[in-house]
Amino acid sequence: MYVVLKPRIEAALRESFLREASERGLTAIPLPGLEGRALALIGPAAAAEALAAHAAVEEAVADERPYKKVARGLHPHDTLVALGGHALGGEDILVVAGPCAVETPEQMRTVAAAVRAGGAHGLRGGAFKPRTSPYSFQGHGVEGVRLLADVARAEGLPVVTEILDPRDLDAMLPHVDVFQIGARNMQNFTLLKAVGGQPKPVLLKRGLCATLEEFLLAAEYVVDAGNERIILCERGIRTFETATRNTLDLNAVPWLKQRSHLPVVVDPSHATGLRELVAPMSKAALAAGADGLLIEVHPDPSRAWSDGRQSLDAATFARLMNELRSLATALGRRLP
C-alpha cells in the first residue's frame, strides 16, 4: 500500500504513524516527491489497510502487486549494477561470454583470451553444473571456480558463475564477482536469502516455467535479504514447441523494464540451444531493450563437455560482437 501523509502535520503525529507501522510489522519507505509525505508500506496487507485509517494519513492507495522493493514505483530510476569498469542498466550494453562448463586449464585460458579479444565485459563458466541426468558432467566444484577466477584475472575480466548451495558461498566469495542463480534454482528460497545476505551482484535467471510475477518475487527475496544489486536474466521458458531448446520470451524484456528498476539481460544460447540462432536472437534482444547478453563460447564446440550445440567458436563470437556494436549505435546506446 502507498500512503500520503497530511501536509504540515506535527512531528509527534508523524512519529506516531511510523511507530504504529513498525509495531504492526510494516516497513515505511519514503517515495520521491510530495515533500517526503509519500510512503510505501511494506509488509502484511491487513496491517497496512488498518493503518490507512491513522489520523496522519491523507490518502491511501492499494497496490495489488505482491512484489514491492523491486517495483519501479519505489525506485523510479534504473538500478545500475557494476561489472568490471562498466555498469549494467544504463547507456552501455554489456556482454558476458564463456563456456557452459569449466573443463581444463588450457580450455579456459584459450576461451578467456578469445572472449576478451572479441570485446566481452565478463567471463562466465560453470564450475557447479546442475544437470538433468545424474550421469552428465557435474562440474569441478570449488576447484573449477578457482581456475575460472585465475584465467579471468589474467585477462582483466570479472567472473560470473553459478552457485547451487549456500554452503559453498564462503569458499566462492573471494573468487566470484557476480553470483548466478540458475533457472532450476529460481525458487530455491534458502539460496536466494543466502546470496541476498552478501554484497556482490546476483544474476537471477528466470525459471523454466515461471511467470514474470514469480520471477520478480524471486528477486524480491534477494532484495529483502539486503542485496539490491540484482541482474534479471530471461533465458527462455518451456512451451509446447520442440524446434528449439526453449522459447525465448522477448516480451519479458520491456515488461520487466517497465515494472522493475533492475537491469535485464538475455541468454540466447540457453534459450535457443542452437548456435545458428544465437546471433539473430541477440540482436532481437537488444532491439527489445535488453541491457546485456550472456553468450556461450567454446574453443571447439564439437568437443565441449556440455552444451556444445549452442556454443559459438571464437571467430563467430568476434563477428557477432562487431555486428552488435553497430546495432547498439543505431539504438542510441553503446557496446563499449
Image (cartoon, rainbow, N blue to C red):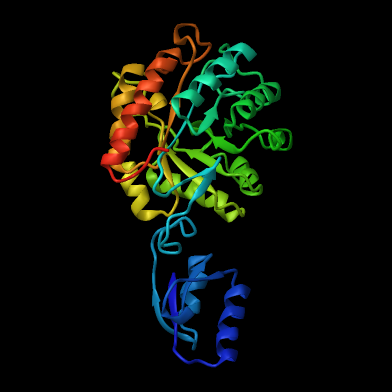
Q: Which of the 4 image quadrants contains residue 269?
A: top left
Tally of numbered tags: 0
Please report the residue visible at 37 percent of the width from the left and 27 percent of the height from the top.
321
Looking at the picture, how far across and down is residue 58, in whole percent? 41, 85
Report x, y in % for residue 102. 59, 19
Q: Residue 235 or 57: which is nearer the viewer?
A: 235
Q: Can residue 119 be seen in the rendering of this structure?
A: yes
Front one among 6 and 209: 6
Residue 143 placement (x, y as % from top left): 70, 22
Q: Quadrant of residue 179?
A: top right
Residue 269 falls left or right of residue 157: left
Residue sitting at x 61%, y 48% = 196
101, above or below 176, in the image: above
Q: Quadrant of the N terminus?
A: bottom left
Q: Position of residue 90 (x, y in %)?
A: 42, 49
- Relative to residue 173, is residue 6 depicted above or below? below
Residue at 67% from the left image edge and 37% from the top image edge: 166
**Above or below, comparing residue 277 to residue 287 in the picture:** above
Residue 240 visible in the picture: no
Quadrant position of residue 140: top right
Report the quarter where the C terminus lies.
Answer: top left
At x 52%, y 71%, the residue is 47
Q: Residue furthest right?
A: 171
Name the outermost residue toward the top. 303
Of 315 and 252, which appears nearest the observer? 315
